[in-house]
Image (cartoon, helix red, strand yellow):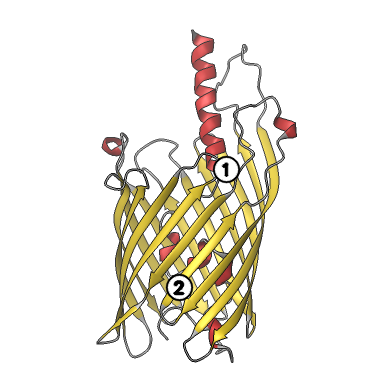
Amino acid sequence: MKKIAILSFLLLTVTSGYSQELNLPVFTQYLADNPFVISPTYAGIGDNLRIRANGLTQWVGIKDAPDNQSIYGDFRIADRSGVGVSFYNDKNGNTNQAGAKFSFAHHLILDYYSKQYLSFGMSYNINTFSIDIANLVPNNPDFAITDDRKVSNNNFDVGFLYRKDNFYLSLNANNILNKDIDQFSGYKIEPNLLRNYQVYTGYVIKIPNWAEIEPSAYFQLFESDGRSSTDLNIKYRKYNRDDDYYWVGMSYRFLNDQVLKPLNLGPMAGFKKSIFYFGYSYQMTFNEMTAFNSGTHMITVGLDFLQGISDCPCTQSPVHD
């Protein structure tokens, strides 16, 4: 019975770890005025250099709960092109995922007068995934696996972004290549199909007194098992004469076969003062673990500087100038 319990625990941990590898956790990082989190097509839109650093702690109060740190930077390299890079570290119990993305985007004018733009983006991804075996079954001489396991893989993301005036629609495919798992042929539980698809859309509604309301939606579909989720978001921004602003918002996430049963629900807020940006998001998770944690907390800090006005309106900031 002891061996069965140990093997069952290992199976649960490894399965959870490989599920983690399907995609980095996307909560509300992209709503901190940084849609580059979910799409390379946003690289180079806006200020010449935009940096965002995120710290996210999920299910606060539960030991070894998922914890994520990431940093994103993108800037314009010409009137119509931009590049970006991101680095991330994601720990989930005894599994850890770390890596980087290197992105390029090009922006085109479809119609100058109606402000229609089309952007293409691609990211090269390198990812390292590891399992800390020693912490799973310490001091157990009967357990066959005694060393840590680590693997690195490479992949690509591609995306398209259409904008018309204050409307935007982003379509993305992440991890488009199947994963080579030959070296793990003994592990039948590891998936090799990592592709997932994302749709992000919204509209900025200008209202009097230097303010705007932005409803948006974010849809994500995993090809491997067909599961999908949707975020419904609303944000309000208020500006001053110096283009500084503060914002408040709310996000509601649900599985698409359980629309009225939220996965996460929570408020968020932030501000931009000169070149400095700060945002905070809180999400309550509605499942069996609700009684044992105080929710998920995320903090975003950033800098927007080296501003330069492009000759092409296709790279103007999506946020009010």
Is any part of residue 90 visible from this angle? yes
Quadrant in which the C terminus is drawn: bottom left
Q: Quadrant of residue 59?
A: top left
Q: Is residue 306 visible?
A: no
- Dividing the picture into quarters, in which one does residue 261 lie? top left
Name above or below for residue 238 compared with residue 156: below
Residue at position x 54%, y 24% in the image: 10
The one nearer the camera, 105 or 132, is 105
Q: Is residue 229 left or right of residue 138?
A: left
Q: CA distance from mark 1 to mark 2?
A: 29 Å
Q: Residues within 10 Å of mark 2 (few under 14, many from 20)?
A: some
Disc 1 crowd, CA 10 A, few/some/many (<14, 14-19, 20+)? many
Name the residue carrying label 1.
21
* Amino acid marked by disc 2: Tyr
Q: Which mark is residue 35?
A: none
x, y (%) of residue 200? 45, 63
Picture residue at 31% right of the left edge, 69% below the top: 235
Residue at numbered disc 2: 168
Residue at 60%, 58% in the rendered image: 87
Q: Position of residue 125 (x, y in %)?
A: 66, 55
